[in-house]
Image (cartoon, rainbow, N blue to C red):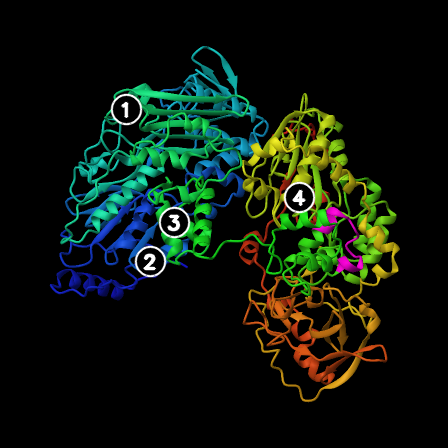
Amino acid sequence: MGPPQLTPQALSAALKSLHEKANNPNPTPNYSPPSNILSNGPINGFLQPALPPTPPSDGPRRIVIIGFGMVSVAFLEKLLKKDTTSLITIIGEEPHIAYNRVGLSSFFEHRKIEELYLNPKEWYESQPQLRHHVSTRVTSIDKDRKEVITANGDRVPYDILILSTGSDAVIPADTPGHDAASGVFVYRQHSDLERLITFGRQAHGSTGLVVGGGLLGLEAAKAMMDLNEFGQVKLVDKNSWVLSRQLDKDAGQLVIEKVEELGLEVLRRKKIKEILLDTDRKVRGVVFEDGEELECSCICFAIGIKPRDELAASASIATAPRGGFIVDHNLQTSVPGIYAIGECASWHNQTFGLIAPGVEMADVLAFNLCRPDDDSSLPKSFRRPDLSTKLKLLGVNVASFGDYFADRDGPQEATESPGVKALSYKDPFEAVYKKYLFTADGKYLLGGMIIGDTKDYIKLVGMVKSKKPLEVPPSRFILGAKQDGEDDNPDDLPDDTQVCSCHNVSKGDISAAVKSGTCKTVLEIKSCTKAGAGCGGCMPLVTQIFNAEMKAMGAEVKNHLCPHFEYSRVDLFNIISVRQLKTMDEVMREVGKNPESLGCELCKPTLASIFASLWNRHVMDTPMHGLQETNDKFLANIQRNGTFSVVPRVPGGEITADRLIVIGQVAKKYNLYCKITGGQRIDMFGAKKQDLIPIWTELIEAGMESGHAYAKSLRTVKSCVGTTWCRFGINDSVGMAIRLEERYKSIRSPHKLKGGVSGCVRECAEAQNKDFGLVATEKGYNIYVGGNGGSKPRHSEILIKDCPLEQVIPTIDRYLMFYIRTADKLQRTARWIENLPGGIAYLRQVVIDDSLGIGAELERQMEELVSTYFCEWTEVIKDPVRRAAFQQFANTGESVDGVEIVTERDQTRPTYWPKDAAAKEDFKGTKWSTLTWQPVVKASHFGDDTGPSGTSAVIKRGDTQLAIFKVRGKYYSTQQMCPHKRAFVLSDGLIGDDEKGNMWVSCPHHKRNFELKGDSPGSCRNDEEMNVATFEVEERDDGWVYLKLPPVQELDARLGTKRWMIKAEETESPFQGVDGMLKGRKSRKVNGAECAPEDVAACKPTTKQPVAVGGCGGGNPGLDW
């Protein structure tokens, strides 16, 4: 919604109001100007009407912040907590509100700038005293009139001005070629990344160069590698080792070894003399000062930053020789009333490129600006900041803390014992390096650096800051280090321990937020205290502190599967395995809180998955069927209109023409919507439940199998063509992908599994964002694990390099079975590895080094599981009992649509759901005129199962669909339509209960739980706006099930399918605005003739054009490989 527009009359009134308030000797304390003056946008092209040069003496204080970055918002948040009367304006040059620059590289994973926002847009709009502006550049400061002037001439008055303009990335202007038309980048802000992404698509397979071996350089290198576009990424550093500002030579060399293992080549002691350009002034390579040339298409400079202090000249603000606004200990510049914070501020001739010092500045300034005049306490002063840093760069944990170069440069502060002594530890096998610096007498810790094992970082930083004598000899810091896998105990940390260095959040801050009741989840802790909102490296400790405080308050955070079990998914897997439990009844009797409980929609699918992983019974067997989610129950993914999708397996993406023809014939015969999936197979949508049997019969007769797209199991193993066709291929990726998919197909796991195999480093199969992925090398395969796309993407990590071909399957066997045995419910491999004690390093020890001695057992268990394979659809087709489950209604062969079908692009699909599809009516309270018992379905349809799974049926009465459930010999009935989205699906939902005996059915679409038995049958337990009608039901001696129903006409008027089905007229196309832009477009001109769309074929040129062919990265640059 655009900013409000002021009429001349309103503008005049607003100005008059401001002037009256400015000259009013007794202003209203809570005065705020008219809402249109405080809008979050320009007013008729102006930020604010011009005010007299003399600021109002009695009106609200006007604070203007120039810059909309992380430090600016940290200051803004602190200011808003302390100051409720000042009028605050924040002005940003970028088109986005403040985002997390520290986590900028994660943008390559999700490509959504909104996921980096520090606060949502609504937060800024909800602050009544705040106006925020983006895409607005301030060009000068009029210090005499106390106004800032923007690029379009707007003048914004201030009483206090905060400069938080940040810095610019440095490009070496003295290097020939630095001004190339294409191929020169910096790594600084979101727009830089967008440019790099666009360029990467055009330069696929070429070499990318990063210049600079500091923190930013390694981040940039990781970002370019994550793009998966460059054939090679190389890092150029003028120093002998990377991170020379944070690490000594030994530590820097170790980092180089680790990152080179991950595929990044580091060129040391190299300086670029010239950037080589082609005739179009595009980068084609570089020449180093030693004369060596290197071919590349792209150079990303990360060699430093320059404070943005260009506004100093207009206001005569003093600047430092190395750049930056000079500030004193109060952070005031040389001009009274103008302050500077963050990277643009020069304190003692130092500027700071880390977020933590900037946040510390923000804290000092916000505190001082909000001190009451009568406050006798001393103002805060900005002191030498703590530059401790802990980061994960290219998968390598790196930390430096305290005075980490005290041995080289001398201590920054005087100590009682002159001199410095170092204690070092290096483990080349585990890639761990520790160097701790002490006073000469060993009584005080001064600082240090760590590579690899950074678990003690928080405690070490606290020890340095406390300046207290050590209680143990220095040797204990190495020899007494805790073992891998042991957790930090947050109780050992004092409250003043800094947990989040980015936002200066202490353990005490987090504890106070939990104890006060302000924060009840880790996410709320992050939002409230900002802990973890920077680099995120402190989140494991934040979570531990949160859990410890919750436990101390008697509200321990438990990882129990659900209210029916006091065990986690891992615990239950082991119990079921050891005790050889085979059914839900057995598990509930052995370890359930109530042996007679039915379970719920949480535990039933989890137990079904465990049973399948251990015993691999058919999911439609009687004791298993009622535990399954709807997808597994009918071996197909249920879609929003109640139909299902059909996905035959296409191992490795390889399929014959004959099978393609069969798929096409089946899709045409049953009017199915076809789409190619991201996993290289064909998805057919819109299959009716009763058509699934004949559809799969035709597919299986053609030699195809179930693709398990409906299950938490292996979906696909994606592949490029490898040596089968590609001239760049190193290995047969298709053959390997097919073998892996054939081995692991159908195995059930805690969550879905996806694999990939690439035949060379060009990585066309995107194997490095899969649960397991292989990339061919000259010696075998690099195996990557723990990657995934989805709502929280994660790049995979390398498990083993150059794995010989014969060891690939045993390695993946161990990895997958260890995951199946130890993951939490519905936990992808990415989150599982993140939560493993020791992460990928621990996983390597278990899988590769067999540190637990269970390698052979994991392989044996996987072998037993895969040896029991059967195609679930083949077994259904052969079994009349299982086939009987595939019908829409139990009492008629009719078929009814619940959503109107439309035709689009020559295929049919259900019409869109309207924005508010819910039927918010009191179905439960419906008053029927009369009710009579009517036979509806034979009791034999439900079988004689008396277990907790239950059985169900849907019957059609007139135009109304009704659901009937049989649970432990008793019947229940409701309408079939879930009112949330008006979907006719309730009979397919899972049955659950609680300790009080209340029972419900959970809608398979969006988990609305409707009560079947309890205080209020028909009510929704988790959405009070929803309810359903219920009906009395009983089984009689004649073998029929009877329902007590109203007359058909009355029933249809209230619950009829035609009344509630989603119709096209209710919805609108989301592409209305876009389609308007495309109207009237015609085909391109071919041979000078303009063709209408229907005439394109006739206009094709008669001369055959040459076609570029080739493998990855070859041939036509327009081909996107």
Q: Is residue 253 above or below residue 477?
A: above
Magenta stretch: give its range: 610-625
Q: Nearer the viewer, residue 993 or 119?
A: 993
Q: N-terminal of the two: label 3 or label 2? A: 2
Disc 3 crowd rating (10 Å Cα; few below 14, some 14-19, many 20+) is: many
Q: For the residues labelled 4 and 1, say whether their Cβ atoms are less than 8 Å apart.
A: no
Q: How far is the residue under mark 3 from the one under mark 2?
A: 24 Å
Q: Which of the two discs, 4 and 1, labels the residue nearer the N terminus?
A: 1
- Please, which residue is most extreme toward the top here? 291
Q: Is residue 669 above or below residue 777?
A: below
Badge 4, how many Cα within 10 Å: few under 14, some, many 20+? Answer: many
Q: Which mark is nearer the camera, 2 or 4?
A: 4
Tell me the residue that label 2 is attached to. Answer: 127
User: Which numbered disc flags the more N-terminal residue, 3 or 1?
Assistant: 1
Asked whether disc 3 touches disc 1, contact meaning CB atoms under 8 Å apart, the reply is no
Residue type indicated by callout 4: Arg
Name the residue beneath numbered marker 4: 821
Q: Residues within 10 Å of mark 1 (few under 14, many from 20)?
A: some
Residue 937 lies in quadrant:
bottom right
Q: Is residue 583 magenta?
A: no
Q: Could you give the CA–CA distance between mark 2 and mark 4, rounded to whole angstroms?
A: 49 Å
- Which residue: 19% across, 50% down? 159
Secondary structure at numbered mark 4: helix
The residue labelled by disc 3 is 510
User: Disc 1 residue type?
Assistant: Pro
Q: SS for tag 3?
A: helix
